Image (tube, rainbow, N blue to C red):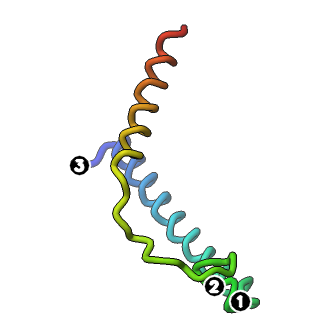
């Protein structure tokens, strides 16, 4: 048997799931009504007018990731040093 605590949790999840679907439906509905003025420049991938030079999925240097990770680690250490 469900106690009153579990029923409250179930109702909370039910309401939250319903709100998510309502918001998704409203977003789709509003985007259909307010996006009538689409032109080829607006829906293109690059709005700046330049064609892409090469594929966006190129190998990236791991050097930049290592510097970013080191910056985050040392930044956090400095934050913990000062009270």
- Comparing 36 with 49, the one in front is 49
CA separation in Å, label 1 and label 2: 7 Å
In the image, residue 70 above or below residue 33? above
Any mark on residue 38, and which? Answer: 1
SS category of the residue bearing label 3: loop
- Comparing 64 with 73, the one in front is 64
SS category of the residue bearing label 2: loop
Q: Give how far across and how far down residue 59 sits, in percent.
A: 34, 63
Labels 1 and 2 touching (C-beta < 8 A): yes
| Mark 3, other Cα within 10 Å: few <14 / some 14–19 / many ≥20 | few
Sequence order check: which comes first, mark 3 or mark 2? 3
Residue under numbered circle 2? 43
Q: In screen coordinates, is 61 left or right of 42? A: left
At x 71%, y 85%, the residue is: 35
Residue under numbered circle 3? 1
Q: Give how far across and how far down residue 52 sits, in percent.
A: 54, 79
Labels 3 and 1 touching (C-beta < 8 A): no
In the image, residue 14 above or below residue 32? above
Any mark on residue 26, and which? Answer: none
At x 73%, y 90%, the residue is: 36
Q: Quadrant of the C terminus?
A: top right
Sequence order check: which comes first, mark 1 or mark 2? 1
């Amino acid at each position: 048997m469900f106690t009153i605590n579990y029923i409250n949790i179930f109702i909370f999840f039910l309401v939250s799931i319903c709100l998510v679907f309502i918001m998704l439906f409203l977003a789709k509905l509003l985007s259909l009504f307010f996006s009538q003025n689409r032109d080829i420049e607006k829906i293109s991938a690059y709005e700046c007018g330049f064609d892409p030079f090469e594929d966006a999925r190129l190998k990236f240097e791991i050097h930049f990731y290592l510097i970013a990770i080191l910056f985050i680690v040392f930044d956090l250490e400095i934050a913990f040093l000062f009270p």
